[in-house]
Amino acid sequence: MSERALKTPQDASVEPMARRGLGHALQAMRAIVLRELYKFSQQTGRLVSALVRPLLWLAVFAAGFRNVFGVAIVEPYDTYIPYDVYIVPGLVGMVLLFNGMQSSLAMVYDREMGLMRLLLTAPLPRPWLLFSKLCATALLSVLQAIAFVAVAAAIGTELPLLSLAGLHALAALAAGALMLGALGLLLSVHIKQLENFAGTMNFVIFPMYFLSTALYPLWKLQESGAEWVYQLARFNPFTYAVEWIRFALYGKDPGLAPYVVLGCLVVFFGLACWGYDPQRGFGGLTKRGGGG
């Protein structure tokens, strides 16, 4: 008797159902990503604001310190570099950070009155829907970061542009974007109203940015005697995202940075999925609010 004849009707239906389930999941991810890209294409001001913010830092802040604060010959640099070259990876991180936090604001809005309110009740695993949203956020972050680097190079900042096209640099950008997007998802669990986003700016975005190596190297902090700032910067995950991008641009080994970034990505995304569980996080709060 042939192997095909031995299969039961239930066995025969398992594979098509599995394929349909996978196809449905991928179709949902594609729809979410394309929707975010379409929304972004209709919001010209969003791209302009994403580029103007770091470009102002580069053109004004860095220009003022160009000849005052240079960076000595330390890894990953092989020569003495001006300050504007040093802060470009930090400004790339700023683009990723602000877009990741902005996605949390959009998530709160979508969750209350937009598409995500419907998607979170769709017959798909909620972690998959959140992962699809995260991928869309990360893709937009990477595209904005590449646009910023291109403009920075166009205005005269000396950068290893060929390294940007390498797999290492793209991996660093993508991982940093995913980690900060996952942090944005986690924050959206706890932000119940759009008005609370200002608090997120003050207590999350700015401390993460200024207590990192985005604007100054760790050894400068330690050398200046700012020990508590140095220690906070050492334990700041944003520091490791910036350093991974910095070392990747120059083709150097980033050390522990990839492990810290990927580890934080898993933790942030896991906690976000836990928070969006209907029995624990947002869903449970909605039930209780609706029942009252």
Image: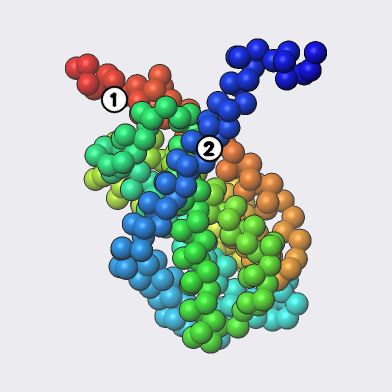
Please say if 18 is above or below 233: above
Q: Neighbour class for label 2 at 10 Å: few (<14), some, many (≥20)?
A: few
Q: Position of residue 291 (x, y in %)?
A: 22, 16
Mark 1 vs mark 2: give the one in front. 2
Marks 1/2 in contact by CB < 8 Å: the verdict is no
Q: Position of residue 199 (x, y in %)?
A: 32, 47
Q: Position of residue 197 (x, y in %)?
A: 31, 47
Say how many tags the image has: 2
Looking at numbered disc 2 in the image, what kind of residue is underneath it?
Answer: Gly
**Nearest the camera: 257 or 50?**
50
User: Label 1, on which residue?
Assistant: 286
Q: Quadrant of residue 81?
A: bottom right
Looking at numbered disc 1 in the image, what kind of residue is underneath it?
Answer: Thr
Element carrying mark 2: helix
Q: Quadrant of the N terminus?
A: top right
**Disc ID at residue 255:** none
User: Label 2, on which residue?
Assistant: 23
